[in-house]
Structures are given as C-alpha cells and as structure tokens.
Amino acid sequence: MVRRKAGDSVQGVKPMRERALMFTRMLSRATAGMATAGALAFAAALAPAQAQEAVKIGLILPMTGGQASTGKQIDNAVKLYMQQHGDTVAGKKIEIILKDDAALPDNTKRLAQELIVNDKVSFIAGFGVTPAALAAAPLATQAKIPEVVMAAGTSIITEKSPYIVRTSFTLAQSSTIIADWAAKNGIKKVATLTTDYAPGNDALNFFSRILPPAAGRSSKRSRCPWPIPISRRSCSG
C-alpha cells in the first residue's frame, strides 16, 4: 500500500499501420489524464459533504502483472495532477491510498473491502480491467460509496451499481473509431484478435457494426481466453 500526498515525483507522412498505432498510443495517454481529472473533480463535488478532515480516495490499480502498464499510467497521471493542482479540493485535503490488485478480481474485492472498512475511504477508484470493476460493484452499493472507473472499458459496468461512474472510455467508443478509420482508408481485409470475455466481445461487436460488409466477410476472427495464454494455439478462430 502506498499513501501519497501532493509533491510526489512522476516516473518518468507515415504508413497507415504506423499512424493507427500512433493513434492508439495517443488515445491511451489522453485517457489516463482525463480519467484523473474527472475523478478528482468528482471528488471535489462531493467533498464538502464529508465530515472528516481529509477526503480519502482508495485507488485500486494493477501495478504488477500483465496489466501493469495501465496501472502505472493512471498512477502517474494522479501524481502529475496533484503536483500541478495541489492536494486540496473545495477546502478539503485529498489523500490517495494506492493498492495493487494485479488485475485479479479476488484481490480487487478484498482490497476494496479493506479500504472501505479499515481506511474509511470516501471513494474507491481505478480498476484496470472489467472483472476488477465488477468485483467492487456490490461493495460500492452496500457501502453507498462512489466507485470511479478510470480504465475498464466494457459498456455494462456502469449498470452494475448506481454508485458507479466512468471517467475514461468504453471499448465501443474506441472500436468504432478504428473501424471508421479502416473503412475510410479502404481496408479490404481485416484480422481481429480479441479476448473471449466481455471487453473483447464488446470491442469486436462494435467494430463489426462499422466495418464495411466486404471487409467483414473477408475478416479473420480469433478469440483468446482471459488471461491471454502464452501459446497462440489456445486461441480459437
């Protein structure tokens, strides 16, 4: 667990394929920043109603494991925002309590419960993958504490608790953008590789809706179980 206050340091014409990759990276970076600003603004809106001296935010992120890059981007964005804007919002001090769930939903549920019961947080936030966000949803509902989803992108997440708000994106949004780009650039054949659970299926479904019929008929689709196995032979399609 890491407790953080303001002043902490921050870590550290092309071919069509390269342009697509560049767009994806830019979208990822922008998402992390917007998620942070949105979450802290959300905290500011409710902070005056809190009775305690500091408003505690439990930040649950995958800082280790296969999704660590997502967690580190969001963590760095939080640090940067607090460096630039300080740790006081609406007259309340903001205290971030960072915990690593390694993108494992059982860990997420346990950590969320510890944050709510032991640390008395006013919000839980973060959530790098959909199963993590869904695992915390019943706890947010029971404790009547806002759950701020900063990364997990499956469309249904916000339907699982009246206390969930999303500050980032949905896979439907990012998938339709790249499908629209492919259509406008005359892409005739498409191969997709998605995870065979809610986020991957969301991405594929919305991508396929925008894809031109000719490209859709000639596309190859492969699905992999989650977590993604080392051997590609485990993927179907």
Image (cartoon, grey):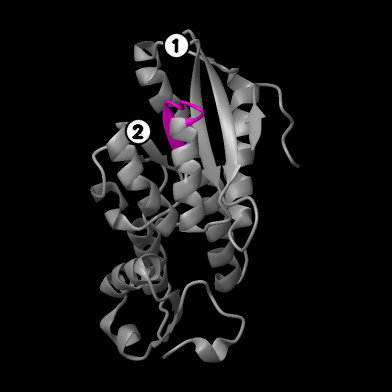
Q: Image point 51% across, 28% down: which residue?
A: 119
Q: Main secondary structure of the magenta part?
A: loop
Q: Residues within 10 Å of mark 1 (few under 14, many from 20)?
A: few
Residue 111 is inside the magenta segment? no
Q: Is residue 164 visible?
A: no
79 is higher (above) or lower (below) than 5: below
Outermost front residue:
118
Mark 1 or mark 2, which is nearer the start of the sequence?
A: 1
Residue 63: image location, x then y, percent? 63, 50
Q: Image point 39% across, 55% down: which residue?
A: 153
The N terminus, quarter of image: top right
Question: What residue is pinned by disc 2?
Answer: 146
Residue 121: image location, x then y, percent? 46, 27
**Residue type beneath disc 2:** Pro
Could you tell whether 107 is left or right of 134 in the image? right
Residue 81: image location, x then y, percent? 59, 28
SS state under label 2? loop
Q: Image point 29% across, 31% down: which residue?
A: 144
Residue 77: image location, x then y, percent? 59, 37
Q: Image point 57% across, 65% down: which residue?
A: 21
Could you tell whether 149 is left or right of 27 in the image? left
126 is higher (above) or lower (below) than 144: below
The region drawn magenta spans 118-125
**Residue type beneath disc 1:** Ala
Residue 113 picture quarter: top left
Question: What residue is pinned by disc 1?
Answer: 90
SS state under label 1? loop
The C terminus, quarter of image: bottom left
